[in-house]
Amino acid sequence: MTALPNATSFVAITTPIFSLGEDLIQFIHSNVDQHLVREGMVLAITSKIVSLAEGRTVPREQVEKLELIKREADVYLGPMGYGSHLTITKGLLLASAGIDVSNSENGDFILYPVDPFTSAMQLWKTLREKWKIKDLGIILTDSRTTPLRLGVTGFALAYWGINGLRRCVGDKDLFGRELKMTSVNVVDGLAAAATLLMGEAAESRPLVVVHPGGDSHTVLFSDETSPDELCSTLEDDLYWRALRSGPIGGS
């Protein structure tokens, strides 16, 4: 198999453990080697260290997890298997509102940032100025399960500086037929690849630098990002009719 010229590259960065309340900008600047910093790069950051930087933790003895899930969720849909609960949180279908205790130093609950897109925007603005580059993408990543699939895959909780969606309506397929509806979720694809390299256990790789291929139009940089770009309303979503029928396992 021949490698594609100018293919997109992903570089996972091993770092010291990030602590609650630590300065995230300084952490990134200290751990991302300057030779990786260039125009047209994307930095994927696990959302967990963003949450820790923003102090988004709750001691486990302070609250029942289900109460916290319902507090953090936009919509609580009911119990799932294995003690989890199905929610819509930050516009995403997630187990237990994304609340986690894995890799929590004190065993506290780690919550999502209050406004992940604002967090991504602030990181984008500060790092772009610090690194003196114009085209920079920031992706905050996490992982989740998929119905009828074992294992977790990464997704973009939020992003800034790039277009998350590439619309292919009007493009031609291999046989010249015009595409009527197809769009490509670019940012979740990048997040999935980055999260695979980050790992889920003790790898300590919370940062991944992405260099899109020079001949690729996959990643388009932009100074403006819309948090609603990838969002579907509940009523228009393909799966909402099934979800609104009630809690999983309910009658």
Image (cartoon, helix red, strand yellow):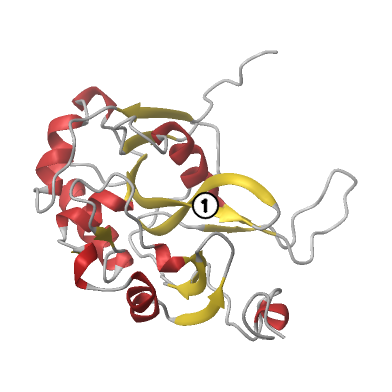
Looking at the rendering, in which quadrant would you find the N terminus?
top right
* Nearer to the camera, 30 or 62: 62
Question: Residue 4 is drawn in which quadrant?
Answer: top right
In the displayed structure image, the side of residue 148 where residue 188 appears, left or right: left
Question: Residue 59 is drawn in which quadrant?
Answer: bottom left
Does residue 91 appear in this view?
Answer: no
In the displayed structure image, the side of residue 203 where residue 10 appears, left or right: right
Q: Where is residue 47 in the image (x, y as percent from the top left)?
A: 32, 53
In the displayed structure image, the side of residue 126 where residue 124 appears, left or right: right
> Helix, strand, or loop for circle 1?
helix
Q: Position of residue 220 (x, y in %)?
A: 47, 50
* Nearer to the camera, 106 or 131: 106
* Nearer to the camera, 4 or 31: 31
Above or below residue 75? Residue 227 is above
Above or below residue 210? Residue 2 is above
Q: Position of residue 229 (x, y in %)?
A: 49, 69
Residue lying farthest top? 1
Q: Which residue is drawn at 56% across and 53% down?
A: 145
For the image shown, how many numbered marks are present on the structure? 1
* Nearer to the camera, 96 or 48: 96
Question: Residue 171 is drawn in which quadrant?
Answer: bottom right
Per the image, the residue denoted by label 1 is 188
Q: Which residue is drawn at 80% across and 52% down?
A: 172
Does residue 149 appear in this view?
Answer: yes
Q: Residue at x 39, y 80 (%)?
A: 70
Name the kind of residue labelled 1 in the image. Asp
